[in-house]
Amino acid sequence: MQQFTNKIAPSILAADFGSFTAEVAKIKEAGAEYVHIDVMDGHFVDNLTFGSGVVAALRPHTDLVLDVHMMVESPEKYVEEFAKAGADIMSIHVEATAHIHGALQKIKAAGMKASVVINPGTPVSAIEPVLSMVDMVLVMTVNPGFGGQAFIPETMDKVRELVKIRETKGLIFEIEVDGGIDDKTIEQARDAGANVFVAGSFVFKGDVAAKVQKLRDKL
Ligand SMILES: O=C(CO)[C@H](O)[C@H](O)COP(=O)(O)O
Ligand SMILES: [Fe+2]
């Protein structure tokens, strides 16, 4: 069985929007591997956050992996600009494009790692045709749009299903979970087979280093 390294990905959606560089320095100091950046367009989800400008502003200040979660319609339109801004991973929702295969191809061609995302209501079968071309699958553990929501435990069945498919077909992709991850739910996600853990509210409410350590202790 393949081993995938566990990674913690604090989401700056829950950080101080006025001090992103300082917040990312805290994430680094805390020993996290990824910075999770939630891009929302007010159409795919009912919330607006930020665009590639934030990625470009952060890039010179950190060597952490910039893990961009696109909650936007037709994400293929923005691939080049995020690559240019310095994004390392681009995650796109299968629900947000009519051209998931082409969009993932575009992400890889632009030099980023390609990741496909499924909402809580979307089955694994919707992404099966593209599993052989992705570096990561992001299983949403809340409905996208807002931080601070409760983890949906039923999504763990999909993580287990993905692990099975990965083993059966000999594929190589990481499995990320996003939404409602804390020091309790992370254990469920770990047991199901996820290895990249996004956490916003849990990490940024209180001492960032102590919170990242609390998550790490459970892995
Ligand atoms: O993609 C997201 C929301 O759509 C966020 O990454 C996620 O909600 C993280 O926040 P929290 O840990 O507070 O749930
Ligand atoms: Fe996210």
Image (cartoon, grey):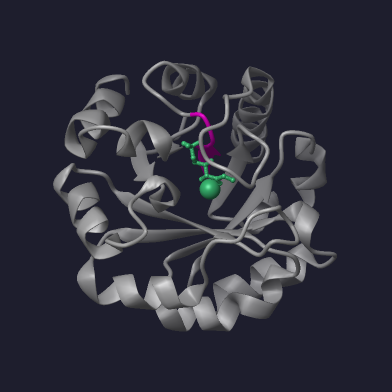
Residue 129, placed above or below residue 61: above
**Toward the viewer: 4 or 180?**
180
Corner quadrant of residue 84: bottom left
How far from the left and from the top, in percent, is residue 117?
65, 49
- Work out whether residue 9 can be spotted: yes
Residue 185, placed above or below residue 32: above
Residue located at (21% from left, 70% from top): 61
Residue 212, placed above or below residue 188: below
Residue 128, placed above or below residue 48: above
How far from the left and from the top, in percent, is residue 36?
42, 52
How far from the left and from the top, in percent, is residue 190?
45, 23
Residue located at (68% from left, 38% from top): 143
Corner quadrant of residue 142: top right
Residue located at (32% from left, 34% from top): 205
Magenta extent: 171-180
Most extreme residue toward the right is 98
Count the numbered circles shown.
0
Residue located at (75% from left, 54% from top): 94
| Left-right relation of 30 to 216 | left
| Left-right relation of 211 to 48 | left
Is residue 179 a member of the stretch shown in magenta?
Answer: yes
**Toward the viewer: 208 or 94?**
208
How far from the left and from the top, in percent, is residue 206?
25, 32
**Toward the viewer: 10 or 13?**
13
Is residue 113 a member of the stretch shown in magenta?
Answer: no
